Image (tube, rainbow, N blue to C red):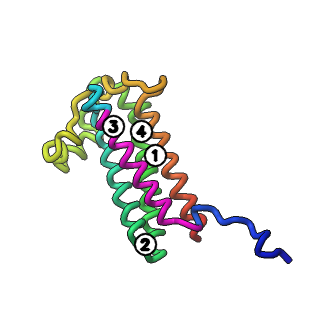
Amino acid sequence: MPSALHTPPRSVFARMPRGVLALIALAALAAVGLALLSQHGFGMQPCPWCIFQRVLYLALAAVALIGWISKPRLAQTAASMGVLVLALGGVASAVFQHKVAALDASCALTLADRFLMATGLETTLPWLFQVTATCMDAAGYRLLGLGFEVWSGALFALLALTALRLLLVRR
Protein backbone atom coordinates (compact mmCIF):
# COMPACT_ATOMS: atom_id res chain seq x y z
CA MET A 1 0.00 0.00 0.00
CA PRO A 2 1.60 3.32 -1.09
CA SER A 3 2.14 5.93 1.55
CA ALA A 4 1.55 9.63 1.17
CA LEU A 5 5.28 10.09 0.62
CA HIS A 6 5.20 7.86 -2.45
CA THR A 7 2.20 9.27 -4.29
CA PRO A 8 3.15 10.57 -7.71
CA PRO A 9 3.11 14.35 -8.04
CA ARG A 10 0.17 15.81 -9.90
CA SER A 11 0.98 17.83 -12.98
CA VAL A 12 0.64 21.59 -13.12
CA PHE A 13 -2.30 21.03 -15.46
CA ALA A 14 -4.19 19.25 -12.68
CA ARG A 15 -3.00 21.46 -9.82
CA MET A 16 -3.32 24.89 -11.45
CA PRO A 17 -5.61 24.85 -14.50
CA ARG A 18 -6.42 28.52 -14.05
CA GLY A 19 -2.70 29.32 -14.00
CA VAL A 20 -2.21 27.39 -17.23
CA LEU A 21 -5.05 29.38 -18.82
CA ALA A 22 -3.37 32.60 -17.65
CA LEU A 23 -0.09 31.48 -19.26
CA ILE A 24 -1.93 30.66 -22.50
CA ALA A 25 -3.42 34.17 -22.52
CA LEU A 26 -0.02 35.70 -21.78
CA ALA A 27 1.63 33.76 -24.63
CA ALA A 28 -1.09 34.83 -27.08
CA LEU A 29 -0.81 38.48 -26.04
CA ALA A 30 2.99 38.28 -26.27
CA ALA A 31 2.67 37.01 -29.84
CA VAL A 32 0.55 40.04 -30.76
CA GLY A 33 2.99 42.32 -28.94
CA LEU A 34 5.92 40.88 -30.88
CA ALA A 35 4.00 41.25 -34.13
CA LEU A 36 3.36 44.91 -33.33
CA LEU A 37 7.00 45.46 -32.40
CA SER A 38 8.08 43.83 -35.66
CA GLN A 39 5.65 45.99 -37.60
CA HIS A 40 6.06 49.38 -35.96
CA GLY A 41 9.62 49.02 -34.69
CA PHE A 42 11.28 47.11 -37.52
CA GLY A 43 9.08 47.87 -40.52
CA MET A 44 7.84 44.33 -41.15
CA GLN A 45 4.48 44.95 -42.81
CA PRO A 46 1.58 42.50 -42.25
CA CYS A 47 -0.57 40.80 -44.86
CA PRO A 48 -4.26 39.84 -44.40
CA TRP A 49 -3.34 36.41 -42.99
CA CYS A 50 -0.90 37.98 -40.52
CA ILE A 51 -3.68 40.24 -39.27
CA PHE A 52 -6.19 37.38 -39.20
CA GLN A 53 -3.81 35.47 -36.92
CA ARG A 54 -3.58 38.51 -34.65
CA VAL A 55 -7.37 38.41 -34.35
CA LEU A 56 -7.22 34.71 -33.48
CA TYR A 57 -4.52 35.33 -30.84
CA LEU A 58 -6.59 38.10 -29.26
CA ALA A 59 -9.76 35.98 -29.26
CA LEU A 60 -7.79 33.07 -27.81
CA ALA A 61 -6.37 35.32 -25.08
CA ALA A 62 -9.86 36.62 -24.24
CA VAL A 63 -11.27 33.09 -23.95
CA ALA A 64 -8.31 31.96 -21.82
CA LEU A 65 -8.69 35.01 -19.56
CA ILE A 66 -12.40 34.26 -19.08
CA GLY A 67 -11.38 30.74 -18.02
CA TRP A 68 -8.74 32.19 -15.71
CA ILE A 69 -11.17 34.47 -13.86
CA SER A 70 -13.88 31.80 -13.68
CA LYS A 71 -14.06 29.62 -10.62
CA PRO A 72 -16.46 26.92 -11.84
CA ARG A 73 -14.77 23.90 -13.34
CA LEU A 74 -17.26 23.88 -16.22
CA ALA A 75 -16.24 27.41 -17.26
CA GLN A 76 -12.56 26.45 -17.21
CA THR A 77 -13.30 23.38 -19.32
CA ALA A 78 -15.32 25.47 -21.78
CA ALA A 79 -12.49 27.99 -21.98
CA SER A 80 -9.99 25.19 -22.64
CA MET A 81 -12.22 23.92 -25.45
CA GLY A 82 -12.48 27.42 -26.89
CA VAL A 83 -8.71 27.85 -26.77
CA LEU A 84 -8.27 24.49 -28.49
CA VAL A 85 -10.65 25.41 -31.33
CA LEU A 86 -9.12 28.86 -31.84
CA ALA A 87 -5.57 27.48 -31.72
CA LEU A 88 -6.42 24.81 -34.31
CA GLY A 89 -7.89 27.59 -36.47
CA GLY A 90 -4.61 29.44 -36.02
CA VAL A 91 -2.61 26.40 -37.13
CA ALA A 92 -4.83 26.08 -40.20
CA SER A 93 -4.45 29.76 -41.06
CA ALA A 94 -0.67 29.65 -40.64
CA VAL A 95 -0.42 26.56 -42.86
CA PHE A 96 -2.66 28.18 -45.47
CA GLN A 97 -0.58 31.37 -45.35
CA HIS A 98 2.64 29.41 -45.77
CA LYS A 99 1.52 26.92 -48.41
CA VAL A 100 -0.99 28.94 -50.46
CA ALA A 101 -1.26 32.66 -49.70
CA ALA A 102 2.49 33.32 -49.67
CA LEU A 103 2.64 32.20 -53.30
CA ASP A 104 -0.11 34.63 -54.37
CA ALA A 105 0.96 38.13 -55.32
CA SER A 106 -2.25 39.75 -54.10
CA CYS A 107 -3.98 37.34 -51.67
CA ALA A 108 -6.98 39.64 -52.03
CA LEU A 109 -10.45 38.33 -51.32
CA THR A 110 -9.28 35.33 -49.36
CA LEU A 111 -11.09 34.41 -46.16
CA ALA A 112 -8.76 36.62 -44.11
CA ASP A 113 -9.25 39.62 -46.38
CA ARG A 114 -13.04 39.21 -46.48
CA PHE A 115 -13.17 38.81 -42.68
CA LEU A 116 -11.22 42.04 -42.15
CA MET A 117 -13.43 43.95 -44.61
CA ALA A 118 -16.64 42.57 -43.06
CA THR A 119 -15.66 43.38 -39.47
CA GLY A 120 -14.22 46.84 -40.17
CA LEU A 121 -11.30 46.13 -37.84
CA GLU A 122 -8.83 47.58 -40.30
CA THR A 123 -10.45 51.02 -40.15
CA THR A 124 -11.42 50.87 -36.47
CA LEU A 125 -7.94 50.09 -35.13
CA PRO A 126 -5.52 50.58 -38.02
CA TRP A 127 -2.39 50.50 -35.83
CA LEU A 128 -3.35 46.94 -34.86
CA PHE A 129 -5.28 45.53 -37.80
CA GLN A 130 -4.32 47.46 -40.96
CA VAL A 131 -3.04 45.32 -43.83
CA THR A 132 0.01 46.95 -45.40
CA ALA A 133 1.57 44.14 -47.44
CA THR A 134 0.66 41.34 -49.79
CA CYS A 135 1.08 37.76 -48.65
CA MET A 136 4.01 37.32 -51.02
CA ASP A 137 5.74 40.40 -49.60
CA ALA A 138 5.14 39.29 -46.00
CA ALA A 139 6.55 35.84 -46.79
CA GLY A 140 9.97 37.43 -47.21
CA TYR A 141 10.30 38.23 -43.51
CA ARG A 142 12.35 35.65 -41.61
CA LEU A 143 13.40 35.00 -38.05
CA LEU A 144 16.19 32.45 -37.59
CA GLY A 145 15.58 31.27 -41.14
CA LEU A 146 11.86 30.61 -40.71
CA GLY A 147 8.95 32.73 -41.88
CA PHE A 148 6.85 34.47 -39.26
CA GLU A 149 3.87 32.33 -40.27
CA VAL A 150 5.87 29.20 -39.36
CA TRP A 151 6.64 30.59 -35.92
CA SER A 152 3.02 31.61 -35.51
CA GLY A 153 1.82 28.16 -36.55
CA ALA A 154 4.22 26.55 -34.07
CA LEU A 155 2.91 28.73 -31.23
CA PHE A 156 -0.69 27.98 -32.18
CA ALA A 157 0.18 24.26 -32.18
CA LEU A 158 1.79 24.56 -28.74
CA LEU A 159 -1.27 26.40 -27.40
CA ALA A 160 -3.56 23.74 -28.91
CA LEU A 161 -1.56 20.95 -27.27
CA THR A 162 -1.61 22.80 -23.95
CA ALA A 163 -5.39 23.24 -24.13
CA LEU A 164 -5.82 19.58 -25.09
CA ARG A 165 -3.69 18.53 -22.14
CA LEU A 166 -5.85 20.67 -19.86
CA LEU A 167 -8.96 19.00 -21.21
CA LEU A 168 -7.57 15.49 -20.82
CA VAL A 169 -6.42 16.10 -17.25
CA ARG A 170 -9.76 17.69 -16.32
CA ARG A 171 -11.92 14.76 -17.59
Q: Which residue is mark 3?
A: 35
Report, in whole angstroms, how far the alpha carbon at label 4 lies from the one at label 1: 9 Å
Q: Earlier in the sequence, mark 1 or mark 3?
A: 3
Which mark identifies residue 101?
A: none
Report, in whole angstroms, how far the alpha carbon at label 2 lies from the one at label 3: 30 Å
Q: Nearer the viewer, residue 115 or 18?
A: 18
Magenta span includes 155: no
Report, in whole angstroms, how far the alpha carbon at label 3 lies from the one at label 4: 14 Å
Mark 1 vs mark 3, foreground winner is 3
Q: Nearer the viewer, residue 35 or 6?
A: 6
Q: Earlier in the sequence, mark 1 or mark 2?
A: 2
Span shown in magenta: 15-37
Q: Amino acid at mark 1?
A: Phe
Q: Which image quarter is the C terminus in? A: bottom right
Q: Which residue is mark 1?
A: 156
Which mark identifies residue 94?
A: 4
Report, in whole angstroms, how far the alpha carbon at label 2 lies from the one at label 4: 28 Å
- Left or right of 164 in this view: 47: left
Q: Amino acid at mark 2?
A: Ala
Q: Main secondary structure of the magenta part?
A: helix
Quadrant hosting residue 113: top left
Asked if marks 4 and 1 touch (Cβ < 8 Å), the reply is yes
Mark 2 vs mark 4, foreground winner is 2
